[in-house]
Image (cartoon, helix red, strand yellow):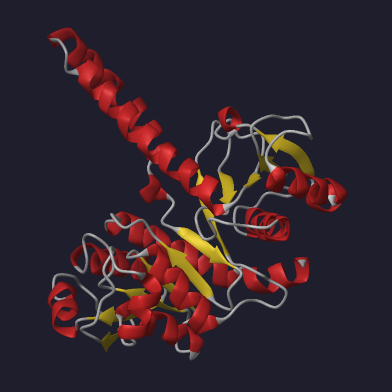
Amino acid sequence: MIRIAIDAMGGDFAPVEIVKGAVEGAKEYNVALQLVGDEEQIKFELAKYDINGLDIQITHTDEVIEMGESPTKALRQKKKASIVLSVDSVAKGESQAVVAAGSTGAAMASSLFGLGRLQGIHRPAICATLPSKKKHIVLVDAGANTDSEPKNLYQSAIMGRVFAQEVLGYENPTVGLMNIGEEAGKGNALAKETFAILENKKEELNFIGNIEGRDVLVGDCHVIVCDGFVGNVILKVVEGTAVVLFDLIREQFMSSPFAKILGGLCKPLFGNIKKKMDYSEYGGALLLGVKGITVISHGSSKAHAIKNAVRVAKEAVDKDINGKIVKGL
């Protein structure tokens, strides 16, 4: 049985929502758990649920890397932090994947130092799944590297394509490069040089050229490649747009008695759309390129998001995504 290490103390709602989501994930996806954090608090939360038949182990630590801390500095000072011990569980082979909802920087640094990079990978990249008008799309890099080189983006394209093919099930996923225009000569030096590399590997990657910002959520391109700075901006804009959009719709449906009746009738329809746009449905983003499976969840993740992060982790292990990335390289 696959065992997944969970940083029980990471995130805005830890350990309450983290433990709840982990238990739900263990039940639904038939995995074992390694909950890492304050043992007393974890046991208090576990007592709320029926965990008979579940394989749950607890690794105690009272050290936590907070959201505002410098990841590298904190890793040197807190060598028994919950995220560090979670990753260490994978490094030792005790667990096959780790799920973390705390500091993204700490999760990335812990995974890079604790697990190392896959053979041939220069820099790991965050692979985020986003909703679109059609099917789910893959955005890579979504925040791991704010400064990248063309070779990094080329490797991100390979890793993103493997993820889309193996985890999302796309038979021959298309790859596009995020840019300010469709023409080959558009963009900064990074975009132009990367375009030349991807164009040279057009058949191998199924590269379809540049993708503009307005086309991201259309869904015609399965894998969108960019540096981590741009990718993280896109990710946050999509999240923020979804929140604002549904707040505006809710305001309109509360504006008059007639609007309230109409809103009640339309609620199931908008509920389906909201579910599709909700980041918690996607669980978390895989950190691709390290020798292990690390799923990084949103800092504000609640139980539903953590449960889905467990699903993402299990799928990545089952599909041997790292082995396929090495093969792809």
Quadrant of the image containing the C terminus: bottom right
- Left/right placement of residue 267 relative to residue 85 reads left
- Left/right placement of residue 196 relative to residue 110 reads right
Could you say which is closer to the camera, residue 302 or residue 262? 302
What x and y, as percent, mark residue 21?
A: 29, 63
Residue for point 79% across, 51% down: 205
Residue for point 21% across, 61% down: 13
Look at the image and tell me whether residue 144 can be seen: yes
What x and y, as percent, mark residue 317?
A: 56, 72
Residue for point 19% across, 81% down: 38
Could you say which is closer to the camera, residue 179 or residue 291? 179
What x and y, as percent, mark residue 309?
A: 41, 61
Residue for point 45% across, 63% down: 311
What x and y, as percent, mark residue 320?
A: 63, 72
Q: Is residue 43 above or below residue 316?
A: below
Residue 101 image-quadrant placement: bottom left
Q: Which residue in the rendered view is the most extreme toward the front?
A: 189
Q: Is residue 1 above or below residue 277?
A: below
Question: What is the total number of numbered labels drawn onto the structure image?
Answer: 0
Could you say which is closer to the camera, residue 298 or residue 73? 73
Residue 211 image-quadrant placement: top right
Q: Is residue 94 above or below residue 227?
A: below
